[in-house]
Image: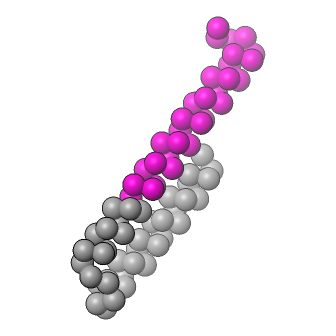
């Protein structure tokens, strides 16, 4: 979960910087900005989902190892 938090936070900071650049300059086209925003959002969501799945698997494995569940 720690890695997903780092990835999501980094992507958020990069997106804020990208947005500020687009708002104050015309460095990127609107189409490229939207594509980059969607890509960053998808990567953030996927990293969080993978981290949650791995965390759930680790919790279930620990419970099975400790004989709390079958």
Most common secondary structure along the magenta stretch:
helix
Left or right of 61? Residue 11 is left
Q: Specify whether 23 is left or right of 1.
A: left
Residue at x 32%, y 84% (from the top left corner): 28
Residue at the far right in the pictured view: 66
Horizontal arrangement in the rendering, residue 38 relative to residue 47 (left or right): left
From this viewpoint, which residue is outermost toward the bottom? 25
Relative to 16, residue 12 above or below: above
Can the viewer see residue 70 in this picture?
yes
Q: Looking at the picture, does residue 49 appear above or below residue 13?
A: above
Residues in magenta, as a range: 41-70
Residue 36 position within the rendered picture, expressed as x and y whole percent measured from the top left: 36, 69
Q: Which residue sits furthest left?
A: 30
Q: How are the residues colored? A: one colour
Q: Residue sitting at 31 percent across and 74 percent down?
A: 33
Q: Is residue 34 magenta?
A: no
In the rendered view, would you say 2 is above or below 31?
A: above
> Is 47 inside the magenta-drawn segment?
yes
| Rendering coords of residue 29 (x, y %) | 27, 82
Corner quadrant of residue 57 = top right
Is residue 24 visible to us here? Answer: no
Q: Position of residue 21 (x, y in %)?
A: 37, 85
User: Residue shown at 49%/47% (left/top)?
Assistant: 48
Q: Quadrant of residue 34?
A: bottom left
Picture layout, residue 37 above or below residue 27: above
Quadrant position of the C terminus in the picture: top right
Q: How many marks are shown on the rendered structure?
A: 0
Residue 9: give x, y in percent of width and height. 52, 62
Going 58% across and 59% down the picture, which residue do you hit?
6
């Amino acid at each position: 979960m720690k890695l997903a938090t780092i990835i999501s936070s980094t992507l958020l900071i990069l997106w804020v910087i990208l947005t500020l650049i687009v708002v104050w300059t015309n460095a990127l086209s609107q189409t490229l900005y939207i594509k980059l925003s969607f890509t960053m959002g998808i990567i953030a969501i996927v990293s969080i989902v993978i981290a949650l799945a791995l965390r759930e698997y680790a919790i279930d494995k620990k419970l099975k190892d400790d004989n709390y569940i079958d």
